[in-house]
Image (spheres, rainbow, N blue to C red):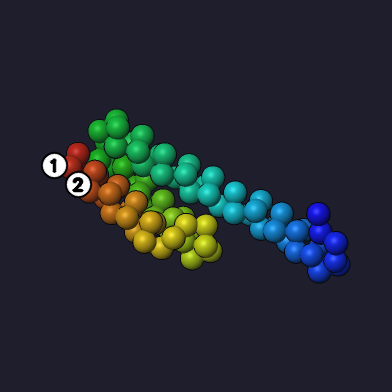
Amino acid sequence: MANTKSAKKKTRVIARRTEINKNRRSGMRTYIRKVEEAIASGDGNAARDALRAAEPQMMRASQKGVLHKKTASRKISRLTHQIAKISK
């Protein structure tokens, strides 16, 4: 348990940031799930639109430190590749 005033404040800050990061991660996962559902249904146009909405969320999460930048890029790349396969 925190003893000093600064350590107590730091635990409050960490708790606040954890909530914010959870919300960002959850929102990002929701957008990714929408893309994956559109891919699974075979609808290329819906999947492309869903990816256009998901990409900024993923990059924002990476900028805020919720996700590593290369992880976000890799996920976007893989989703784009899957969409390209169903769009043919």
Q: Amino acid at mark 1?
A: Lys
Q: Which mark is residue 88?
A: 1
Q: Residue at x 25, y 33 (%)?
A: 42
Residue in front for this viewpoint, 84 or 21 = 21
Q: Quadrant of residue 73?
A: bottom left
Which quarter of the rendered picture does the C terminus lie within?
Answer: top left
Q: Residues within 10 Å of mark 1 (few under 14, many from 20)?
A: few
Q: Is residue 60 visible?
A: no
Q: Amino acid at mark 2?
A: Ala
Residue 63 screen position, x and y as percent? 49, 65
Q: Residue at x 36, y 34 (%)?
A: 37
**Residue identified by numbered label 2:** 84
Residue in front for this viewpoint, 17 or 53 = 17
Q: Is residue 77 visible?
A: yes
Real-space Cα separation, disc 2 to disc 1, in angstroms: 7 Å
Q: Residue at x 39, y 56 (%)?
A: 72
Mark 2 near mark 1, Cβ–Cβ under 8 Å?
yes
Residue 27 screen position, x and y as percent? 52, 47
- In this rendering, position of residue 60 left or right of residue 87: right
- In this rendering, position of residue 58 left or right of residue 24: left
